[in-house]
Amino acid sequence: MAETICIPKEEFNLMKEELKTLRESQIYRRLLEFEQNIVKGKKLTRADLGF
């Protein structure tokens, strides 16, 4: 069963803007790429991950 919550419109607009900013960031793209590589079964080293 879904749960409904109510938040102020200003807070909702701020969350939308933050989500847009996140999706446009390089780190988010790298995270998606990392996730796709895991699904494909690609073996990664610490250097591949930037450690």
Image: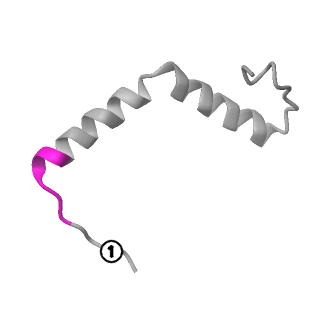
In the image, is 46 to the left or to the right of 11?
right
Which type of secondary structure does the marked residue at label 1 adopt?
Answer: loop
At x 41%, y 23%, the residue is 24
Q: Please report the residue visible at 21 percent of the width from the left and 39 percent of the height from the top.
A: 14
Q: Is residue 3 left or right of residue 37?
A: left
Kind of residue at badge 1 = Glu
Question: Percent position (x, y) of residue 3?
Answer: 33, 74
Q: Residue 46, located in which quarter of the rendered image?
A: top right
Which residues make up the magenta segment?
6-11
| Residue 27 lies in quadrant | top right
Left or right: 21 in relation to 4: right
Q: Residues within 10 Å of mark 1 (few under 14, many from 20)?
A: few
Instruction: Give the side of residue 25 with respect to residue 50, left or right.
Output: left
**Can residue 13 be found in the magenta stretch?**
no
Residue on which the image places disc 1: 3
* Residue for point 11% across, 45% down: 10
Quadrant of the frame with the C terminus: top right
